[in-house]
Amino acid sequence: MNKHSILIIDNDQRFSLSLSLRLENELTVITALNGKDGLSAFDAKSVALILLDLNLPDMSGLEVLKRIREKCVDVKVLIITSKSCHEWAVQCADLNVQGYREKPIDTEKLVEKIRKMIGINDSNYLQILWGKEYEARTVSISHTIRKAMNYIHQNYHKNFSRDDVAAFASISPDHLSRLFHKESGWRLKDYIAKYQTHKIKELLLKRPDMKIKNIAASVGMPDANYFCRFFKKHTGLTPTEFRKNSLT
């Protein structure tokens, strides 16, 4: 069974080992003892969450976070620090951090936090998508299609194929397409487009200072013209029009 991956960038080997042992049955845990190795691991692997210690031996954790955000604005990051959380919160305010944990850390509480941060489905999105059918569909949807949705939610910003989704869900591509349409009510390619559009809208509103070309790159569409055509096709508005209408 494929599992979510998390990346722990922390030079405290005992902490990383303890957390890895606690989570290894549920998640694939990747560890790095310094910023350089952490950035290399992030480039090499698709991760759902990063635990980042701000006190690293080779570079500032803040610098690591900035480099991560240059590549991906949406990966979840949980800050680990031995200093005041308030002090770091101010410096990280514009870098889309999902939380802070101050050392010494209660491992059990941290594990619970990680579990909550890594859900199988984006429930808020599915509630919007399915509306009144949400409860009925979430009860009846199969584990296979949940896995397929999970893959899409975690990799929407990458160039993946139907075969990639099918391999993750351990099902043939044709069977996946039929089952996905039957259970979700949407064709697979339409669902992917809808989810990408949903995440683009979130970024346009969450980061009003972020340039359109940078948002395009962060969702896997480095061609800004294609990005604008894609967004207008699915919303009827350009990204700039949507942002202006929503924020005024």
Image: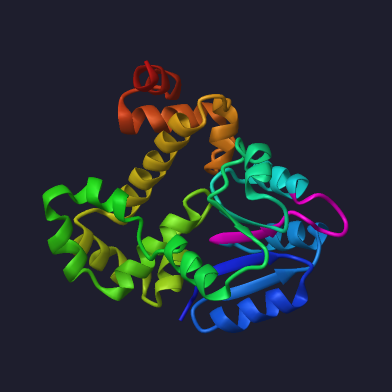
Outermost residue to the right: 58
Q: Is 54 in the magenta?
A: yes
Q: Residue at x 42, y 64 (%)?
A: 116
Q: Position of residue 224 (x, y in %)?
A: 55, 29
- Which colouring convention does the figure follow? rainbow
Of the pair 99 and 130, the residue shown nearer to us: 99
Q: Is 15 in the magenta?
A: no
Left or right: 141 in relation to 200: left
Question: Is residue 217 depicted above or below 27 in this figure?
Answer: above
Query: Which quadrant, please, contains the C terminus?
Result: top left
Quadrant of the rendered image containing residue 142: bottom left
Left or right: 173 in relation to 88: left
Question: Is residue 225 depicted above or below 54 in this figure?
Answer: above
Of the pair 190 and 206, the residue shown nearer to us: 206
Q: Position of residue 241 (x, y in %)?
A: 39, 18
Of the pair 23 and 229, the residue shown nearer to us: 23
Q: Position of residue 71 (x, y in %)?
A: 66, 45
Question: Is residue 107 depicted above or below 95 in this figure?
Answer: below
Q: Residue at x 70, y 75 (%)?
A: 15
Of the pair 14 and 197, the residue shown nearer to us: 14
Q: Residue at x 32, y 67 (%)?
A: 146
Quadrant of the rendered image containing residue 36: bottom right
Q: Position of residue 190 (x, y in %)?
A: 31, 48
Residue 98 can be seen in this image: yes
Residue 4 can be seen in this image: no
Residues in magenta, as a range: 48-61
Q: How many marks?
A: 0
Q: Residue at x 87, y 59 (%)?
A: 57
